[in-house]
Amino acid sequence: MKYNSMINKDFENDDVNIDLTELFLAVWNKIHLVILAGIFIALLAFVGTKAFITPLYSSTTKMYVLTKQDSSAGVTYSDIQTGTQLTKDYMELVKSRPVLEQVIAVLNLDMELEELERLITVETPTDTRILTIVVENQDPKTAKEIADALRESVSIQITEIMDADSVNTFEEGNLPKEPSSPSLVKNMAIGGVLGVLIALAIIVLIFVLDDTIKTPDDVEHYLGLNVLTSIPIQEGVKKSKKVKGMSAKKFVRKMKR
């Protein structure tokens, strides 16, 4: 009884402690599988990106808002700060309902307001009055047309509602030649890293759950028994049948009987 409790105690302690050296060797012996898993998932990401993700093209247009204070003789730093703050209000006008409705009507677009709004990104560089409008669409020509129509429509709204002096076109919408998204390289890199992590997780899980007795050292370590002798198996000799190692838990339960 005392002997069995000693074996159980040693076995339970082993469940908590993991030999990092053995774990590293287990991973290192399967490193080729880890690399293959990374390459395989990266190729899946390549195929998935090409086959299932529709490429989007981005067209960018920029404008500069000239306020009435800028036309006066004395422009103070406070006036410049006020103009910069107003730029945030101009950004809200770009996605306002009247502007979007006008763009849809002018270009005869077959889409709802919410759908058009999702295609638009409005930015402004820090401490500037340059308004940047970016439009994404599956068709590069349509992306450019929407960007230019937005610029024209919001320019009218800014001069009428915000009482700005004028809105000057800083940069017309460009006709994109290459898709802006998705990024093929980025998706493949993410897929490769994900494949490596999955392979490592599986190898570590198998190592942690594997409690079979394989060597004489395992018998002494897990069961506290002295090995009197062992029969070596000659390398290159074919086994007629595959012999599975006995689990340490099963061995302990067998000794209790």
Image (cartoon, rainbow, N blue to C red):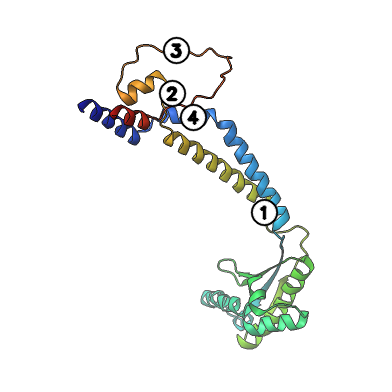
Return the mark for residue 250: none
Q: Residues within 10 Å of mark 2 (few under 14, many from 20)?
A: few
Q: Residue furthest front?
A: 257
Q: What residue would you read off at disc 4? A: 26
Could you tell me the amino acid type at mark 3?
Ile
Q: Residue at x 23, y 25 (%)?
A: 3
Q: How many marks?
A: 4
Could you tell me the amino acid type at mark 1?
Ser
Image location (x, y in percent) of residue 126: 56, 66
Could you tell me the amino acid type at mark 2?
Lys
Which circle's residue, 4 or 2, is located before the other in the chain?
Answer: 4
Q: Nearer the viewer, mark 3 or mark 1?
A: 3
Provide the secondary structure element on which disc 1 rests.
Answer: loop
Which circle's residue, 3 or 1, is located before the other in the chain?
Answer: 1
Q: Nearer the viewer, mark 4 or mark 1?
A: 4
What separation in Å lies between label 1 and label 2 (alpha carbons)? 48 Å
Q: What residue would you read off at disc 1? A: 183
What separation in Å lies between label 3 and label 4 (alpha carbons)? 24 Å
